[in-house]
Amino acid sequence: MPYHACVARERHTFACLRTLMAKATPARSGDALAGLAAATDEERAAAQIALADVPLTDFLSEALVPYETDEVTRLIIDTHDRAAFAPVASLTVGALRDHLLSDATDGAALAALAPGLTPEMAAAVSKICRNQDLVLIASKIEVRTAFRDTIGLKGRLSTRIQPNHPSDDPGGVAASVFDGLMYASGDAVIGVNPSSDNTAAVSAILHLLDEIIATYEIPTQSCVLAHVTTTLAAIEAGAPVDLMFQSIAGTEATNTSFGFSLATLAEAREAALSLGRGTVGNNVMYFETGQGSCLSADAHHGVDQQTLEARAYAVARAFDPLLVNTVVGFIGPEYLYDGKEIVRAGLEDHFCGKLLGLPMGCDICYTNHAEADQNDMDTLMTVLGVAGVTFIMGVPGADDVMLNYQTTSFHDALYLRRALGLRPAPEFEAWLETSGIMRADGGFHLADGRGGRFRAALANAAA
């Protein structure tokens, strides 16, 4: 069905909902590379005007990726909660924006609405929101998950220690872990990107992280971000797996290129649950996403990259994850060209994920050949903090020496907590206090001689 809008006395026609969504998307290099972007700002404005008038029910009758050939589409349609959708079923995309911004729509109402929204609806409303709208709406939403500590509470900001090493050296990994712990990082997860996807190498890192957590009785969880099938093999070999990881995307063809299906994820979740390693909860999945992955895999079906990113969140929420992380600037400037595009994409991803009921974190990052710098990341980190982001990354010096990109540091997390009055997860915060790292007032013992056993452990790991 065609959609129309007039701007500056010119009538613009968009042949279908897929085209309209792409043309309405704020400018980004990936959509231009795919030949999907609006040709002019005027065409983009016309598309946004037309999109605001689209009934939400159109997204239930017009699939952007064919139902018959895509299991992600089938998941979205077959699990749609029509009872949860009923309060907004008569609305257009523009009216949904007004509803979400209304003071009468609080966090409880948004949580109840989440199962009734499809990813395409969330993506559509994000395209007609200003940045401040994305921040305000997301800030209302609290998504709680738990494993060994409780993630996502209001007034809290969690962090992932990302102790990567170019050769998976145990001493190098451990040194980064202890460094992060001394700066109150690690309550979301201690998560290593392995340089090898070999089962034995992955198992060795899992045993190392498990030993650290058990020795110091740290209320957090570990994860080695290997392929899901490698982690399944590690479980069979007796490795101590807390969280199952997989990078996911918004089309079946992309996920197939990643080497898994929805059935694989179901098997992985059941395997992790069978270990019973959680103490305060049983959310055992960790997913990462990123705008542009479907285009990179030549599996985008002519759909814009932001809508496809939102569709990945349907995959995530089907498996009740502890953490979902948009690695927003990692793929490179071919998909998000500069700081402005990265900031916008990060806000969109966080907004759509939380609106759909997910515990959204963000790897606030860029590659060295992008037109971006650490000041752009400071901006995105700050506004995501205001928006209630669940967690961010903590990497020594903000420079990942294995993946070769720029992200956020342990010090960045301290800044954000101090500037916005945020605290770590409650169980982890209590551990920081009893371990002599953090004072009850939120200050640190880094300079007053306490936390001695962690200094010794750090020295031993570095040696």
Image (cartoon, rainbow, N blue to C red):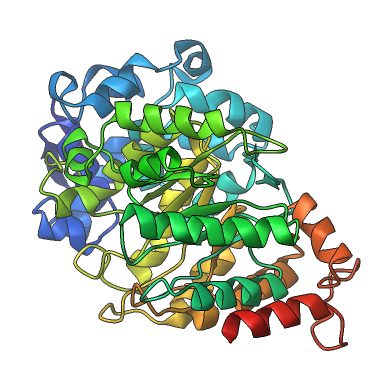
Q: Is residue 36 left or right of residue 102?
A: left
* Position in image of residue 32 (x %, y %): 14, 59
Single out the residue that lies furthest toward the right: 440
Quadrant of the drawing holding the N terminus: top left
Residue displayed at 43% across by 23% down: 91
* Position in image of residue 399 (x %, y %): 44, 80
Quadrant of the drawing holding the C terminus: bottom right
Vertical comparison of 92 with 161: above or below: above
Q: Quadrant of residue 441?
A: bottom right
Q: Quadrant of residue 411?
A: bottom right
Vertical comparison of 341 with 457: above or below: above
Q: Is residue 379 left or right of residue 32?
A: right
Vertical comparison of 55 with 363: above or below: above
Residue displayed at 42% across by 65% down: 343
* Position in image of residue 308 (x %, y %): 27, 42
Residue displayed at 69% across by 45% down: 148
Question: In this rendering, does residue 195 appear at all?
Answer: yes
- Frontmost residue, 247 versus 332: 247
Q: How many marks?
A: 0
- Frontmost residue, 7 versus 108: 108
Q: Is residue 327 left or right of residue 47?
A: right
- Frontmost residue, 56 versus 310: 310
Q: Is residue 365 left or right of residue 63?
A: right
* Position in image of residue 219 (x %, y %): 72, 52
- Frontmost residue, 205 versus 128: 205
Single out the residue that lies furthest toward the top: 83
Question: In this rendering, does residue 158 appear at all?
Answer: no
Q: Quadrant of residue 430?
A: bottom right
Single out the residue that lies furthest toward the front: 237
Vertical comparison of 77 with 161: above or below: above
